[in-house]
Amino acid sequence: MKLQHSLGGLENLGPVSVEPKVFVQDWEKRIFGIHTVMMAESTHLADALPQYPVASLPTAFKDHWTWASLRTGAEGMQPFEYFKYRYYEKWLMGISQFFVDKGYISADELAAQTAHYRAQPAAPLPDQPNTAIKDQIVDYLLRGDSGLRPLPHPPKFSTGQNVTVADPLAADHTRLPGYLRNKQGTVSEVYPGAFEYFVSTGPDGLEGAMPVYRVAFEAADIWGARFSEPHTTIYADLFEVYLQTPSI
């Protein structure tokens, strides 16, 4: 289990940032913009609930990219590297590695371009206006894409049922908080429909549309009575693959 997936109850990680600004430095806006453009051009939008002309977009980007892709890239970092860098620095590293892994640019080319702009920070960036892509980005920002899908099967669990959180193999990115593994809780709500996460998380089993549940946990059952406030309930929204029937 990677450290960045299991922070609940850990001490000595430093103060929580209360920075009110969304973007502290101007370059962070550009990273957010790059991510947004990639999502608006993602090939998964060909099957989105809104109808997007993704297949005919005049773009060289021909891959799948969602928030899950971004998190996979960032959380796949070595844990101590993950904690060393700022929020948008992790975005930058995840996006950069994606483009290298997919062959859009080589590591040497990326290093050369980085050195070029560090030596000449005022050098102009490439500017290639594209009306079709601009219109697609605006349309995507207005309509988005919902992960809500029809149920592939009836929910396995019901409101009020006791469940145990699974302990799957570790993955670079997961939607299962590490501190909930093997803990017992009670289903407090079964959300209507099923939800698609858009990417497979690999060894921990999250793939395809499935039911999602809100599960209630007693804080003392997670961290122990000594380290928990009394009469405190923790709620977590969990995909069905992360839940099991308690063993007797």
Image (tube, grey):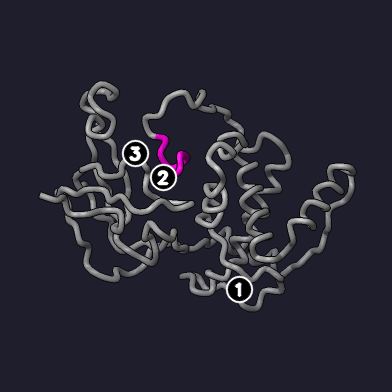
Question: Closest to the observer: 2 or 201?
Answer: 2
Find numbered disc 1 in the image and state the secondary structure of the residue it sits on.
Answer: helix
Q: Earlier in the sequence, mark 1 or mark 2?
A: 2
Mark 3, mark 2: which one is toward the viewer? Answer: 2
Determine the residue positioned at 68% across, 60% down: 100
Label 1 and label 3: CA atoms lie apart by 39 Å
Q: Which residue is mark 1?
A: 54
The reply to whether callout 3 and callout 2 are in contact (CB within 8 Å) is no
Give the amino acid type for the residue marked by disc 3 in the picture.
Tyr
Find numbered disc 3 in the image and state the secondary structure of the residue it sits on.
Answer: helix
Q: Position of residue 239 (x, y in %)?
A: 32, 55
Determine the residue positioned at 59% across, 60% down: 39
Q: Which residue is mark 3?
A: 179
Position of residue 136 relative to residue 122, above or below, is below
Magenta residues span 1-7
- The residue carrying pointer 2 sits among few (fewer than 14), some (14 to 19) or many (20 or more) residues within 10 Å by Cα, namely some
Label 1 and label 2: CA atoms lie apart by 36 Å
Q: Position of residue 69 (x, y in %)?
A: 54, 57
The disc label shown at residue 31, or none: none
Q: Earlier in the sequence, mark 1 or mark 3?
A: 1
Question: Closest to the observer: 100 or 144?
Answer: 100
Q: Position of residue 50 (x, y in %)?
A: 50, 70
Q: Which residue is mark 2?
A: 1
